[in-house]
Image: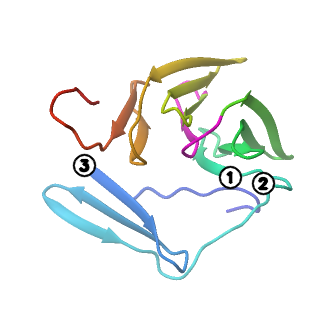
């Protein structure tokens, strides 16, 4: 791939996937398809580091690739009290502030929808799950009013619906999503 560009490789079909990184930085992918559990690990090491800026920009982050192959990153700054959105272009990175005055408890999650718009999902220290969607400006939507624990994840589906998943210990007296 050209310098400062991200590369994607299709790995095939899967019903479920889990991704991890070894202590050496090598990615490991476990996926389930057609009643078979598969383990994928790359040959060699492929790591590229690109600094977005100085200070602690890039903490509590996640990234996604848009339809043009450009990287988009959702991240926090200043002791997890501000959320930023950075977009890669041929001339470098553009970073804008999405929100301030928040106390993040988990990394920002970014998803690109079918209209190539960025969607940031984040959890504050009170367990509030919010969605920031960009469509010429940022709009905020509360998705859930509580999370318990650190096992929270989100996914954007082909129809642009957002799926929230969480593992919680239930006392069987309340519903959990």
Q: Is residue 113 magenta?
A: yes
Q: Is residue 168 above or below residue 141?
A: below
Residue at the disc numbered 1: 59
Q: Earlier in the sequence, mark 3 or mark 2?
A: 3
Q: Distance between the residues labelled 3 and 1?
A: 30 Å
Q: Position of residue 173 (x, y in %)?
A: 17, 28
Pick whichever, 33 or 19, lies toward us. Answer: 19
Mark 3–mark 2 distance (CA, rounded to whole Å): 36 Å
User: Circles 3 and 2: CB distance less than 8 Å?
Assistant: no
Q: Residue at x 73, y 46 (%)?
A: 79
Mark 3 or 2, which is nearer the eye?
A: 2
Provide residue 24's location: percent of width, then percent of height.
54, 80
Q: On residue 15, which mark appears?
A: 3
Task: Determine which of the numbered discs, if any, sits on residue 56 in the image.
Answer: 2
Read off the magenta span.
103-117
In the rendered view, does 170 fall on the left or right side of 64?
left
Q: 12 or 50: which is nearer to us?
A: 50
Specify whether 30 is left or right of 110: left
- For the residues labelled 2 and 1, say whether their Cβ atoms are less than 8 Å apart: yes
């Amino acid at each position: 791939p050209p310098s400062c560009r991200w590369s994607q490789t299709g790995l095939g079909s899967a019903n479920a996937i889990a991704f991890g990184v070894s202590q050496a930085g090598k990615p490991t992918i476990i996926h389930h398809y057609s009643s078979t559990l598969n383990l994928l690990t790359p040959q060699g090491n492929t790591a590229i580091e690109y600094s977005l800026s100085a200070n602690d920009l890039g903490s509590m982050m996640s990234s996604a690739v848009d339809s043009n192959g450009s990287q988009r990153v959702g991240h926090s700054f200043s002791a997890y009290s501000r959320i930023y959105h950075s977009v890669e272009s041929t001339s470098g990175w553009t970073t804008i502030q999405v929100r301030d005055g928040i106390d993040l408890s988990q990394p920002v999650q970014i998803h690109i929808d079918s209209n190539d718009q960025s969607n940031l999902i984040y959890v504050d220290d009170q367990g509030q799950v919010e969605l920031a969607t960009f469509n010429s400006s940022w709009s905020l939507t509360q998705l859930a009013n509580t999370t318990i624990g650190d096992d929270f994840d989100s996914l954007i589906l082909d129809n642009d619906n957002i799926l929230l998943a969480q593992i919680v210990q239930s006392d069987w007296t309340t519903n959990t999503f």
